[in-house]
Image: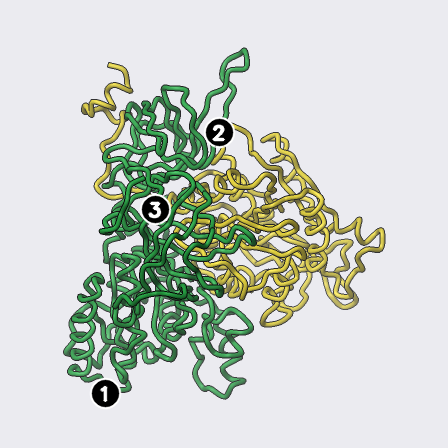
Chain colours: A yellow, B green
Amino acid sequence: MTPVARAAAGAPTGPTGPKPPPAVSPLTHLETLEAEAAHIFREVAGEFDRSTLLFSGGKDSIVMLHVALKAFAPAPLPFPLLHVDTGHNFPEVLAYRDRIVARHDLRLDVASVQSYIDDGTLRERPDGTRNPLQTLPLLDAIRDGRFGAVFGGGRRDEEKARAKERVFSLRDQFGAWDPRRQRPELWQLYNGQHEPGEHVRVFPLSNWTELDVWQYIEHEGIELPEIYFAHRRKVFRRDGMWLAPGDWGGPRDREELCERQVRYRTVGDMSCTGAVDSSAATVQEVITEIAASRVTERGASRADDRLSEAAMEDRKREGYF
Amino acid sequence: MSTDLAEAETRPGPSGRLSGGLLRLATCGSVDDGKSTLVGRLLYDTKSVLGDQLAAIEEVSRRRGQDAPDLALLTDGLRAEREQGITIDVAYRYFATHRRRFILADTPGHVQYTRNMVTGASTADLAVILVDARNGVVAQTMRHCAITALLRVPHVVLAVNKMDAVGYRESTFTAIADEFTARARELGAADAVAIPMSALAGDNVVEPSTRMDWYDGDTLLSHLEGVPLGADPTGKPLRLPVQYVIRQPSGDRGAVERWLAGQLASGVLRVGDPVTVQPAGATSTVVGLTVLGRETDTAWAPQSVAVRLADDIDIARGDVLAAGEAPVPLRRLTATVCHLDERPLRARQRVLLKHTTRTVPAVVEDITYRTDVAVARRLPCHDGLSANDIGGVRILTAEPLAVDDYAENKRTGSFLLIDPQDGSTLSAGMVDTGADDQQRP
């Protein structure tokens, strides 16, 4: 009997054969989240002519890309990647980015904050942080690419303004988020209709937590940039965070460099992404560390969210993710 | 039990497998019933609030002259919410115990934001309806109860909050629980489990109360950990809405294999199964099956899969693969809708209707009634449905749709009405194939 006929006949099979249907859905919470994210990717691919996936080389965008590749396997991704390069990225992360793009034969568009500064369109901020400067290059890239949908790796557990975000988040021609104008989002029915000039930001990992992301990385054996794991690095203290030195403007006057064993919980612009003291060298050790941590991911390592109580909400209103 | 939560979290099982799976819940209650405090308490006592978040709310509480951290501040995410001290929009919260993971839709209590409560409840396995023990069952309580009945939320918890303000009296709790149970039954809601609690003082939310010896039931958290997940989608007939066609070159001479990708809405699918393609009605057999790129013999809802059929028939996004009792494609739908937009929904209005993965032009032929949800009574409706109204509609669609009754299958029984001009979501609908006036095309 062929495997197909055997499955159809429901005959008893060995350990490698088809299993009888379960009494209850046997999906783990990670499998449920993964199936939901794949559904979101496929909805966008089915409804939008042109979309792009924001890829920073950070763990959320890496997991997002991993699910996307699975959702369209064995065919290639039906959309390109877009990286908004602040010009102050960690070299390890850029190397990782290029390695992944080559490995999967992906198309990568890069929007460069540095070139906007070089030609005078954007001006460097006194505090040196370039995170807020990403918005304009991002919006220009969306306009020039005529993208109707842009995938982002944002999660609702990250921040209280993000907790209010829809999976399909409609943005006006300025990329702005208006929390009072959000579309109600019921069941798994996502409304992707938008007018010319508007676009939709799509967050397939909305329902994932930081721990889910790490457990998924472990389960799927996903490679990450090495800076996510404990290593010795020269750092200096500013505003209670360990920052890495670089051309971006640190350390200044009385800030002293020292070498510590650290890792990064998030990966972003070097000027505002802090390292945490850590000895976690493997994914399992990182999971143990996060689960025991008493500080949120953003609280531990993002200077830009500390600017005010509504920092994230304000940036989202301006067109940031 | 709660004391070892943080510790348990440091030992996630292999691949994060928690025996209890993922429970989605929605909290609802009218303004000032203490809903934000309850959600805050749930997060705080399950150690889901981290040091920097706590420091932030302690700081704001101090500035406002409060001596204890106001847990309600944890849930107000928007500037406008913090300024007004009310919840405007649904927020999603995530927490976990060693038994289960939870996604909590924290929905607003204001009547004017009923649609946001509908949004939160649409995916919920369980609804927590809060009442203030001092006020008992009020109109808004029954409105929320009616909505959980309408959306067929499988489990309901009646949280009788602020027991501290009524001297933790058993008679007060019993009277409220009895009244709610009687009225909920009239509305057709799932049987509720009533729990007396004080979110402010922490009684029976996560920690068992020492002040209500007369109560020997579960705390809210232990109930949430133990309640069965919502209706098992694998026990129903197969439904696979086709989302996207994946084309893979096969062999030489430009041959292409077509894989139909989608998320199983219900049922179990095996290689060798015969399937019907709706609404066209063609039939074929499954010869290939993958779950996110991995070949398999069997898949079950809600997995995201791709399917290859034996016959090269015309299938596209919007079609539904079905087995077992197949839905009869309809062009005339009878449904209950919750109207979401500020502009009213009127008879003869042209709309787009999104059902599973298919969006078709449609016209609202008639609005048959408006429901007074506080008393679950149908009223005549002459001038359309306003925002937050719930009512009955008859809709004619440009193409037949393979719908199921919402009571049988939420995924294939629900739809959105969309404004064809500006794309906004107008109404959320639930198909009622059992309605007396149901007509076939």
Residue A259 lies, with reference to residue B362, above or below; the image says below
Pointer 1 and pointer 2 on the same chain? yes
Pointer 3 and pointer 2 on the same chain? yes
For the point 23% across and 75% down, the residue is B196
- Mark 3, mark 2: which one is toward the viewer? 3
Q: Residues within 10 Å of mark 1 (few under 14, many from 20)?
A: few
* Quarter that holds the C terminus of chain B: top left
Mark 3 and mark 2 lie on one chain; the one further toward the N terminus is 2
Residue B222, percent across and down?
Answer: 25, 63
Q: What's the mark number on residue B167? A: 1
**In the rendered structure, which amino acid carries the disc numbered 1?**
Gly
* Quarter that holds the N terminus of chain B: bottom left
The residue labelled by disc 3 is B411
Q: Secondary structure at mark 3?
A: helix
The answer, for residue B106, to whether it is visible in the render is: no
Distance in Å between CA atoms under marks 1 and 3: 45 Å
